[in-house]
Image (cartoon, grey):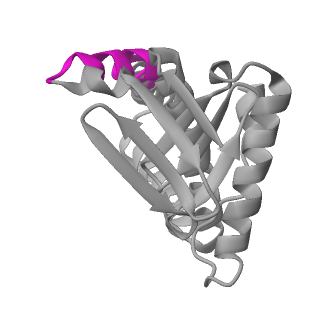
Amino acid sequence: MEVEFELTEDDLVAFNHCLRAAVRRRAREESRRNRAPGWVAVGIGVAVACLVVVADSYWAILRDLGLVLLGAVLTIVWLLTVARPSKVIRKVLQEGRNVRHLQRRKVTTTPEGIGIFRPEMTVHYTWSGIDWIEATPDHVFFFISTRDGIVVPRAAFATDAEFQAFVEQARRWHEAATLNQVAGFRPAPASEKIEKE
């Protein structure tokens, strides 16, 4: 199958959302095996115990804890405001020649793999080189790694049926090519979680 389109900033933001969902899912999976959160809780408990010993009264403890928590909350709010995906994408596209990522391109899928053709480059990945495929109502993402991928927007297709056929065929070819591979990091689909965000 072959489709031709131009990406938009919104397409790259959607990829960023999908990527973040996959990273969060992976972090949750690793935290089940990782005991670090337990040690963080113990450290917080020790810090509070030290405050109780050092402080004159419980009001002083509450005041100090309140200031610490207020600082943490303000830092988180600031980070969320500055690091919004749309701002990050816009900034990245303004640097150097990164605006080329929005150029017209042709994406083809064959039983052997997926190809991307742009005026300055041609790239082909075999299906075994694709880690996983993620589909949302508006996009399909072919992840090459846990940080990089190919975005194909639904808008590139004339109908929803064509888009669904493209996704289903790509998944069949990908599954057939990766069936006998050793299982590595292949996160479960995050489509439901992305739709809710």
Find residue 16 and report its horizontal and vertical position in percent: 50, 33
Give the residue at the far left of this rendering: 96
Question: Which residue is rendered at x = 63% and y = 79% of the image?
Answer: 183
Q: Where's the C terminus, which quadrant?
A: top right
**96 with respect to 129 (left or right):** left
- Give the residues in magenta: 76-96
Question: Where residue 86 sits in the image (x, y, percent)?
Answer: 44, 16
Quadrant housing the N terminus: top right
Image coords of residue 9 (percent x, y): 45, 16
Q: In the image, is 115 to the left or to the right of 101?
A: right
**The furthest residue to the right:** 161
Identify which residue is drawn at 73% across, 71% down.
Answer: 176
User: From what the image shows, is residue 33 above or below residue 194?
Assistant: below
> Is residue 87 part of the magenta span, yes or no?
yes
Residue 134 visible somewhere in the drawing:
yes
**Closest to the observer: 197 or 8?**
8
Placement of 94 over or under 160, stated as above or below: above
Left or right side of 164 for 52: left
Q: State whether the magenta stretch is mostly helix, strand or loop.
A: helix
Q: In which quarter of the image is residue 56?
A: top left
Q: Nearer the viewer, residue 59 or 22?
A: 22
Give 89 or 112, whichever is nearer the viewer: 112
